[in-house]
Image (cartoon, grey):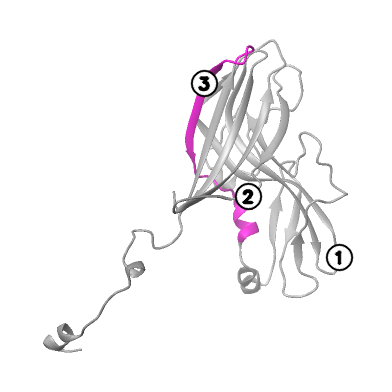
Amino acid sequence: MIGETVKDIDISMPRDAYDTGKHTPTLDAYLTIIVRDSKGKVINIHRQRSHSPTINFIALLLPYNYYSQINGSLTITNIGGGTCSYYPQPNVNAYNIIYPNANVSYTPPGYLVMIQVGSGSQSNAFSATKLAAPIANGSGTGQLLYGSVSIANGIVASGSSAYFQISQSYTNATSGTITITEVGIVVQVYTCSAAKSSPTNCGQVLVWYDVLSSTISVPANGTLVIYYTFTVNP
């Protein structure tokens, strides 16, 4: 259109076409920690924004087109230092991540998914493949008893937002205080082709990692619960 003629057009824009300020869905993750003493009294509530998907997480989400362009696979490193190759393909040899699997133990703390805690820190969370100083599952000195993992049955929608949450509980069964400075989400990765060939147990893989903005202290016989909440369009 040229000149004033464009003003003469009678046009009505649908209401849902107006700018809402949210052109694409946005994702935010939040980490919440609740600590209780030996009597069950809440002594600390910690909340911070989480923003650290790891290199393993990105690799597992890459589309097939990426693998076809590089004509190769990516290496996934588990928390024990072991590796496996991941290479989706558009045929019966395509890699799939299958759950659950009878060849994998999901007993504590080796769940299908778990929230692991530690007493160290790492400056580059993206490249982390394990916690710097993971706290072991147990009742010995410096250890925590890892409780059950709770995963929401579905996504909760509220207005223009939607979220899901995973959580895990822990107990300090020792006579001393346990200090937590890092937290990570670990998943069990087991791959197999669509033709049910070449099964591979990749082990426990760190997919999300956070250094806490302040130290969490769990007193003797105290407990804590950690929540990871992932929200779209918060």
C-alpha distance separating marks 3 and 1: 48 Å
Name which residue type carries label 3.
Answer: Asn
Residue found at x 50% / y 28%:
46
Residue beneath label 2, please? Answer: 154
Residue found at x 63% / y 58%:
59
* Depth order, front residue of 163/92: 163
SS for dot 1: loop
Q: Relative to 74, is 156 above or below?
A: above
Q: Position of residue 4 (x, y in %)?
A: 11, 86
C-alpha distance separating marks 2 and 1: 29 Å
Answer whether labels 3 and 1 touch (C-beta < 8 Å). Answer: no
In front: label 3 or label 1:
3
Residue beneath label 3, please? Answer: 44
Name which residue type carries label 1.
Answer: Lys
SS for dot 3: strand
Residue 229 falls in image quadrant: top right
Q: Relative to 24, is 152 above or below?
A: above
Residues packed near mark 2 inside 10 Å, few (<14), some (14 to 19) or many (20 plus)? few
Residue found at x 45% / y 53%:
233
In front: label 3 or label 2:
2
Residue 196, numbered circle: 1
Residues packed near mark 3 inside 10 Å, few (<14), some (14 to 19) or many (20 plus)? some
Extreme residue toward the left, this view: 4
Answer whether labels 2 and 1 touch (C-beta < 8 Å). Answer: no
The magenta stretch spans residue 158: no
Magenta residues (range) = 37-61
Name which residue type carries label 2.
Answer: Gly
N-terminal-most mark, 2 or 1: 2
N-terminal-most mark, 3 or 2: 3
Q: Where the N terminus falls, by quadrant? A: bottom left
The magenta stretch spans residue 41: yes
N-terminal-most mark, 3 or 1: 3
